[in-house]
Image (spheres, rainbow, N blue to C red):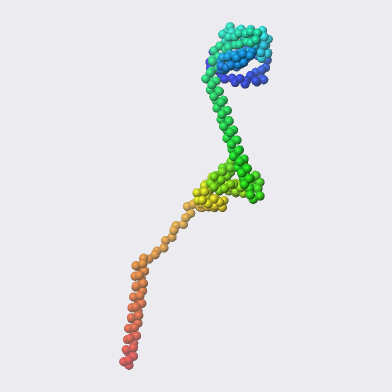
């Protein structure tokens, strides 16, 4: 005996293979299970409100006959067989046939049905949220494009492919540029920001705009200067520093002492020279 069960989506009933007629008895049995309501509901039948319970279905022998490719007699015999086997209960009149699957929960677990419904609803919700975000993103890009074009005072509009206005990162820079008080963006400014982003990086340009705003210097030239300094700093070679050379500088006392010694030597030489000249003059007078 087989245990456990598998989920079969009702969409299988639309498949060309499934609709190949005539149905087998097993196929007809599964078809009855899939046709049954998976939850309680009310319907309008013959001008009156009728409540259909979970696992029940209102149909007719004629509809089942057309659906399965059987004669009405064969359909009725099959329903009687299922009823005798305690697989369904049904009643039929000249207007309708109502059947109920016995132990419907065995074939269609209620908790799994709820879980599948919740999963489906969650998927739909997530898809809707993604679509709304995508729409909002496109609207932001479109509004930025319109704002840029409306703020064009130069009369010279760069080609759209050059401005790259559909780039979400550029759109973020444009918003930051305006939020930081640089003023309404122009086509030229948008093109410059796009060029900066290509030359350096999105993150560098973003930081440069923020630094310019903090320093209260809101110009493209200042942003460019920040980017150049940052690039120059990263391009400097590392571990290539020369050792600082030091020179001996004599202390002031040593300089004074040295000068004093030179002066004393000069004075002594002068005295010795005078003595020699005096001695020489004295010898001359005696003669």
Q: Nearer the viewer, residue 245 or 213?
A: 213
Q: How many marks?
A: 0
Q: Quadrant of the C terminus?
A: bottom left
Q: Position of residue 278 (x, y in %)?
A: 33, 86
Q: Residue at x 52, y 48 (%)?
A: 213
Q: Quadrant of the N terminus?
A: top right
Would you place residue 235 above or below residue 4 in this image? below
Q: Residue at x 56, y 25 (%)?
A: 120
Out of 75 and 177, give the one closest to the viewer.
177
> At x 57% / y 32%, what residue is drawn?
129
- At 46% from the left edge and 57% from the top edge, which residue is drawn? 242
Residue 286 makes an appearance in the image: yes
Let me know if residue 173 appears in the view: no
Say whether residue 159 is left or right of residue 6. right
Expressed as whole percent of the image width and height from the top left, the position of residue 237 reads 50, 52
Instruction: From the top left corner, tell me how far across and down residue 123 is, in percent.
Output: 56, 28
């Amino acid at each position: 005996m087989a245990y456990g069960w598998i989920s079969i989506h009702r969409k299988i009933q639309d498949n060309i293979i499934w609709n190949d007629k005539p149905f087998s008895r097993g196929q007809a049995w599964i078809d009855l299970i899939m046709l049954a309501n998976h939850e309680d509901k009310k319907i309008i039948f013959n001008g009156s409100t009728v409540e259909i319970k979970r696992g029940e279905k209102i149909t007719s022998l004629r509809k089942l006959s057309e659906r399965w490719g059987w004669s009405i007699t064969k359909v009725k015999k099959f329903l009687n067989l299922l009823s005798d086997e305690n697989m369904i209960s049904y009643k039929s009149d000249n207007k309708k046939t109502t059947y109920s699957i016995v132990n419907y929960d065995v074939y269609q677990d209620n908790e799994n049905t709820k879980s599948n419904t919740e999963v489906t609803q969650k998927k739909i919700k997530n898809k809707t949220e993604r679509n709304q975000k995508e729409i909002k993103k496109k609207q932001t890009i479109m509004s930025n494009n319109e704002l840029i074009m409306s703020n064009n005072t130069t009369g010279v509009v760069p080609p759209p492919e050059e401005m790259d206005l559909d780039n979400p990162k550029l759109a973020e820079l444009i918003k930051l540029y305006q939020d930081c008080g640089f003023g309404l963006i122009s086509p030229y400014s948008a093109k410059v920001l796009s060029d900066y982003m290509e030359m350096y990086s999105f993150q560098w340009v973003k930081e440069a705009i923020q630094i310019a705003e903090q320093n209260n210097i809101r110009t493209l030239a200042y942003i460019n200067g920040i980017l150049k300094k940052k690039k120059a700093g990263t391009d400097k070679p590392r571990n290539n520093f020369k050792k600082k050379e030091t020179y001996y500088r004599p202390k002031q006392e040593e300089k004074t002492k040295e000068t004093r010694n030179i002066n004393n030597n000069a004075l002594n030489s002068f005295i010795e020279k005078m003595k020699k000249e005096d001695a020489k003059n004295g010898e001359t007078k005696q003669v």
